[in-house]
Image (tube, helix red, strand yellow):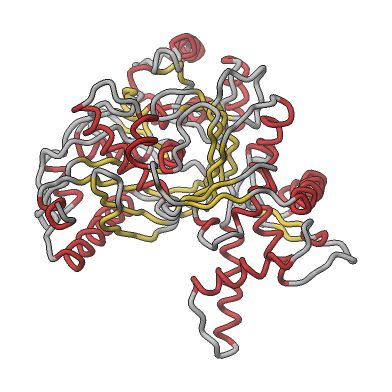
């Protein structure tokens, strides 16, 4: 069966992921080969101090992304896309979307980037004896309670972005266990929210006499391989207003971008790990056993099948780096030499390899927002240097590439140096790795371990979500099939990639940079306190 026949026979899977700066759709065959892609670029807005995306932009972005995919299928295969085998929706995790009984959004969508939940996160961490990060949904819920926000009385459903889109497409209020792990703590054995912590939360807010219990307003938890509803007529029209897409297509559980990143890098089994490096940067290490104690710098989440995962998550990744590259583009145009952005990124990244292993004493923080790992609730992008630092273009780019991994490095140091967590492989994916051999080399230095980047790394999360959709179809035929075996035997067997060992000089240089990064946090804090305009 050729590609045209597979598309016509709906022997396909579609993954759509809502990233921070791009919505991307990936259509694959059932062996994971990419058939077509679609895109929609967007940006969050800062409205009244809240990072958000309006519902209108969410819906319009979904439709434009799907239209882009549909156009690609038409141009490449001469076919109008009418049906696919299965669909999966994923999105940036965490945040707060609150609805009343009529399905009306009660307050602007708060994304993972918001860090206005410090009081709530601290109280809940103490109550549960479990780290509750600022961006988690339960922290947003409780902060709204602490702030006596009027809308809390009318809560009927609270969820995340991927779960919301899934609800709109299927009518089902569910989410995948990996995404759920960023909503409320998970019991990995029960494959559900932690029952004792749910009870503690209800007891905590009982004096408020709300007409709801926390269990009643959160999405139902599903694991990879389970069916999560089918595309309704209304959902089909939302996705494809032109009316070509048929209803009745099965959907797999929606997932967060951390879960899809694990799938896309085959990092779902214990002693595997991956680092996703883009607008935000996070490292996921699948554990053999629980950590010895609570760390505020480490989030405890799960794989899409429920294995416990230690997560070092940085809100701030490459946003500031991207802004500097944009500035260089402006300069190039000013000098009469327009440049392709892909070429510009490639040249600047590659040139950074000429820099000093410790970045020549330069220091940068790309903190557009607060950073939980370093305990800062706000951010100020900052670049600094000593009078005798080696200030040149190579070091300038190198320090911005290093610092995109800086906060994550602090969390990983806890896992590797204090908890002695062991991993057999670390996979890299995301925009940082598009320029071959640069981001990969720096990550290997940061973790002091070999790093592998697959040829599919640039497809990232939406490809991972398409694999989850395809896995659901495979598991329906073979109920005993596990996600780990499915990925090992059917998707990644024979797949090409490159592995890079750490260079000892880079490792030493990154450790020196990390010392500077820790020491300079006082300057970042001072910038936050003094720059209030």
**Horizontal side of residue 81 vs 68, given as left or right:** left
Q: Is residue 526 visible?
A: no
Residue under the point 39% across and 17% down? 192
Residue under the point 49% across and 71% down? 342
Towards the viewer: 488 or 361:
488
Q: Is residue 112 above or below residue 78?
A: above
The percent coordinates of residue 461 (x first, y second) are: 40, 46
Q: Is residue 58 above or below residue 384?
A: above
Q: Is residue 255 visible?
A: yes
Looking at the image, how many numbered discs can be counted on the residues?
0
Towards the viewer: 187 or 487:
487
The percent coordinates of residue 204 (x first, y second) are: 51, 13
**Horizontal side of residue 167 vs 375, given as left or right:** left
The percent coordinates of residue 118 (x first, y second) are: 61, 32
Towards the viewer: 157 or 15:
15
Residue under the point 47% across and 27% down? 302
**Horizontal side of residue 436 vs 209, given as left or right:** right
Name the residue at the bottom extreme: 336
Q: Is residue 231 above or below residue 217?
A: below
Res 346 quadrant in image = bottom right
The percent coordinates of residue 268 (x first, y second) are: 45, 32
Towards the viewer: 522 or 32:
32
Res 244 quadrant in image = bottom left
């Amino acid at each position: 069966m050729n590609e045209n026949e597979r598309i016509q026979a709906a022997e396909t899977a579609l993954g759509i992921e809502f990233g921070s700066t791009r919505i991307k759709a990936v259509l694959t065959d059932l062996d994971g080969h990419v058939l077509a892609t679609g895109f929609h670029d967007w940006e969050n807005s800062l409205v009244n101090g809240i990072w958000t995306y309006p519902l209108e932009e969410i819906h319009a972005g979904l439709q434009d992304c799907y239209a882009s995919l549909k156009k690609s299928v038409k141009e490449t295969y001469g076919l109008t896309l009418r049906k696919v085998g299965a669909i999966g929706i994923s999105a940036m995790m965490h945040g707060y979307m609150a609805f009343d009984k009529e399905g009306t959004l009660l307050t602007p969508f708060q994304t993972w980037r918001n860090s206005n939940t410090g009081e709530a996160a601290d109280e809940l961490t103490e109550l549960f004896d479990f780290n509750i990060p600022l961006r988690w949904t339960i922290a947003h819920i409780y902060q709204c309670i602490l702030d006596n926000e009027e809308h809390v009385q009318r809560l009927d459903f609270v969820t995340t972005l991927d779960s919301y889109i899934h609800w709109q497409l299927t009518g089902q209020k569910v989410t995948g266990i990996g995404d759920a792990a960023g909503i409320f703590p998970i019991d990995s054995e029960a494959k559900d929210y932690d029952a004792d912590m749910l009870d503690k939360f209800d007891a905590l807010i009982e004096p408020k006499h709300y007409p709801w219990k926390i269990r009643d307003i959160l999405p139902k938890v599903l694991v990879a391989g389970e069916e999560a509803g089918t595309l309704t007529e209304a959902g089909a029209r939302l996705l494809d207003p032109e009316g070509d897409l048929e209803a009745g297509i099965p959907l797999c559980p929606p997932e967060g971008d951390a879960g899809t990143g694990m799938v896309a890098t085959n990092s779902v089994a214990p002693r595997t790990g991956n680092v996703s490096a883009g607008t935000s940067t996070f490292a996921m290490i699948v554990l053999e056993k629980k950590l010895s104690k609570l760390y505020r710098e480490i989030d405890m989440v799960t794989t899409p099948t429920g294995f416990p995962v230690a997560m070092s998550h940085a809100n701030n990744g490459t946003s500031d780096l991207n802004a500097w590259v944009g500035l260089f583009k402006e300069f190039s145009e000013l000098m009469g030499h327009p440049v392709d952005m892909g070429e510009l990124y490639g040249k600047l990244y590659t040139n950074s390899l000429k820099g000093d292993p410790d970045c020549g004493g330069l220091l940068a923080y790309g903190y557009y927002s607060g950073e939980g790992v370093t305990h800062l609730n706000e951010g100020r992008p900052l670049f600094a240097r000593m009078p005798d630092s080696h200030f040149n273009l190579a070091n300038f780019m190198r320090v911005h590439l290093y610092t995109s991994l800086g906060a994550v490095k602090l969390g990983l140091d806890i896992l590797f140096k204090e908890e002695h967590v062991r991993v057999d492989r670390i996979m890299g994916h995301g925009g940082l790795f598009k320029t071959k051999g640069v981001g990969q080399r720096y990550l290997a230095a940061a973790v002091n371990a070999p790093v592998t980047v697959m040829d599919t790394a640039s497809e990232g999360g939406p490809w991972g979500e398409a694999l989850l959709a395809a896995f659901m179809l495979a598991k329906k035929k073979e109920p005993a099939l596990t996600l780990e075996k499915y990925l090992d035997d059917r998707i990644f067997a024979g797949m090409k990639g490159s592995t890079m060992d750490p260079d000892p000089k880079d490792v030493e240089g990154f450790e020196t940079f990390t010392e500077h990064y820790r020491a300079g946090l006082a300057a970042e804090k001072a910038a936050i306190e003094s720059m209030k305009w």
